[in-house]
Image (spheres, rainbow, N blue to C red):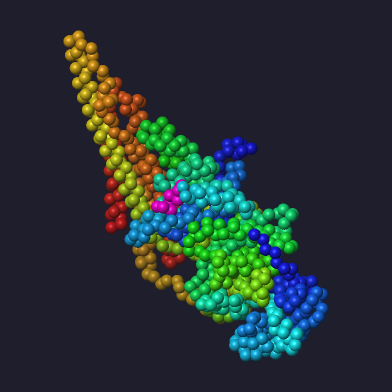
Amino acid sequence: MSITPAPAATAKDGSPIRYVDIFDSIVNGTNDSLTRRSGDHYAHFAVGYGCGDSYYLVNNFGCGGTCYRGFTAQSILLGQAGSGNPKLTGSMYTSNDCSGSISKVGIASGQTTGCIPISGSGDSGKRAKKEALYLLLPEYLTKMVEADSFLHLARPLGPALPGSQPTTAPLNVIIQPQAIFSILDHSLRRNTDSNTDNERVIGTLLGVRSEDGQEVEIRNCFAVGHTETAEQVEVDMDYQKQMLQFHLKANPKEVLVGWYATSAELNTFSALIQNFYGGQGDGTWPHPAVHLTVTTDAGKEIETRTFISAPVGVTADRAADSAAFTPVPHEIRYGEAEKSGLELIAGAKDNKDRTASVPTDIEALERQIEEVLGMLDRVSKYVEAVIEEETPPSSALGQFLLNALALAPKVDPEDIERDFNNHIQDVLVVSYLANTIRTQIDLSNRLATAALTLGAGDGLGGGQTNGTGTEGRERGQRGGRGQRGGGGDRGGDRDRGGDRG
Amino acid sequence: MAEILKDTPLKAVQLEGLVVMKIIKHCSQVFPTTATGFLVGMDKAATLEVTNSFPFPTVDVPATDGHHDNNASSNLAAAAPRAKANMAYQNEMIKKLREVNVDANNTGWYTSANLGNFVNLSMIENQYFYQKEMNERTVAIVHDVSRSSQGSLSLRAFRLSPAFMTAFKEGKFTTESLQKSNLRYQDILLELPLQIHNSHLLTSFLHSLPNPVPTPEAQASQPPTLASLSQTPNPLSPNFNSLNLSIDPFLTQTTDLLLDSIETHHTELNNHQYYQRQLAREQAKITAWQQKRKSENANRALAKQSPLPEDEWQRLFKLPQEPGRLETLLNSRQVEQYARQVDGFAAGVTGKMFAVRGNLLPGAGEG
């Protein structure tokens, strides 16, 4: 299956527009384009090639856009900028001329001054009302992703089927490390033929959703083959469906939650794929599909980002290949069980050959004791530095250290001595018994097979030729030995019983 | 080339970090039920590189009462690697994986264990099946969930020894055959050294995770409140499970397992003794019969009659079948495993206990 989208809009200054920036027009079907000039603080909305025929020019408008959909108009205005003083805010209005505000979120939730009414008269007014402009400049959103705090933007709702309750609740994404590891592995295994321009690889994310749908945990993923050229993208849908079935067989609790790509770029193809994953039927609908990007460019840090999307576009055609990506917060979370594994894997990070061997219990203990000693060292250095007045003191740290010290138990020396002796005896007795049992069983095994070497070499045939009782005696002897071995074990058994009792 | 490769025995197993995480995830998710899955990777001369792993499909067990249910699904999962349906699943999956450039060669399977209780018939049969039917150069990776929760990760790689393979093929584990092949329980499983390997990208990713040792800049910034100190979002912050001093759970569990093994040993011994008594009885009967026939023949010889055949006893009497010693062998191997485990545990724990006493009672340790 292949999808060929319409050519994407390009920014006038040639810089890539990372967020979906399709200027949608249904008027005369002309190819209209959109300009943004973030440096100049204005957004420019134009008709026709070459950005002629100015439509609106929004000054002092650093980041934002207006979304107008159908007859129940809703506008969204994002991140208005005063000159040099960006104020992040998101407002939602019932009508397309920014009146009838329903909600405002954000840091400067009183700010409405950047809002330019979309209105007009005559032809241009009609067109204005019919057209949707959705413009997000990436800079602010990137900043939001990097910061710890998140502005939850209510995503614009797509066409809802009657009877369903689409949600605009905030979404948190939790990523388990093996999913990331898997994506990195896939990225290493991408095709490198020169015919296709496969800068990125994509795959399907599997995981679980919390009951209220506000938290998505990505637990697993698999690679899906795709080829991407300048004009079109091909995703192997059959493959994706079959692999999904395979995975669901093994992990019935996991569901499809979205997809990943190994480049931070969001383009028209991203929107196409996103709409496929978020669609009805095979997709995640009615939940939003999560898009995870993991950058794997050589020489750069690996960055992970997560997005959900909202449909944009007035006609069905345009809606298919456009989407508004909204960043959502994410967190890489490790389970308790994975900790030891991760520690081991991380242990190889400073080795030249990138390998590590599995440590024995004693080695692990040694390493941890060394780590604790290192920590104590650092702490005492810090405390010394504070006493010498070289480092500014911190009351929080002091309190924390004091609390830690207070945890040292106050126990009677005799109690310690008694507990110590009891436990050490337990350990040693069990260890001794385990080894005794081992020896006993070993012995019994050896006797069982060794007895025959002493006996007649021809084994069972012996009775026929030799006839008489020698064989029987030998057999008896062997049986006796076997019993003795068994008795020994029983003895061990009794000992243990006493120990446990 | 292939011939040359086949000749060099496998010497080591190299696990990709991804595989380690996937196995841990799967095993701990279904714990205490047994988890099994298959491994894919590449075979490079003496090293087997395992680069990816996938769990086997779960089978729904009709729900009866809770306890039995658990057992049944555990058994099913343990037998999964050699189940026919899973074979097809695995082959399909490998075919699919080849399309996305994963090293699509079968390199074995993995299973989870609880305190080293993995040496059993099921595991042997699985590995035999893999080494015989699928690909000779396959390994079984055992991940011990309960031991890993005590601190250090427990992952081990095993193969069946060639000697055991031939013996198992014949299916004969009588005293006689054991004697001939000189097979001991120590020779059933070969443990291969295991290494963890990371890709360059993964190394780079690990470096981008915050370091547990704060940088000087981070140290310079002061924590504002006490509460902010107790939040540790750092994924690589050290894990002090190894320093935990909980001794009793481990000891009770291990002794329980040991008792089970002793019971198995007893059953096997009893079987054997029963067989020996049966055998002796039959032998006695045969001898009696032979003597009777001999004296009869002597009488007939005196009476100038032709002697009766003396080997008719083979038709008349049937010697009992000797019970196989396989279970005993495996049990012995299992006990050895437990004993080693206890040794390792005792070594660590005594060290820790002396350290604790030394700390709490300074000066008392010298005595």
Q: Position of residue A331 (x, y in %)?
A: 57, 70
Query: Does residue A241 show up?
Result: yes
Q: Residue furthest top?
A: B304
Which picture quadrant has residue A350?
bottom right
In terms of depth relative to the viewer, which is nearer, B235 or A169?
Answer: A169
Q: Position of residue A469 (x, y in %)?
A: 24, 25
Q: Position of residue A465 (x, y in %)?
A: 29, 21
In terms of depth relative to the viewer, which is nearer, A226 or B350?
Answer: A226
Q: Which quadrant of the figure contains the C terminus of chain B?
A: bottom left
In the picture, measured across the screen, residue A84 lies left or right of residue B140, that is right
Q: Is residue B82 magenta?
A: yes
Which picture quadrant has residue B67?
bottom left
Classified by dominant secondary structure, the portion drawn in magenta counts as helix
Q: Which residue is rendered at x = 30% and y = 45% of the image?
A: B266
Query: Does residue B340 show up?
Result: no
Q: Which residue is rendered at x = 28% and y = 21% of the image?
A: B311
Please state the extent of the stretch shown in magenta in the rendering: B75-83
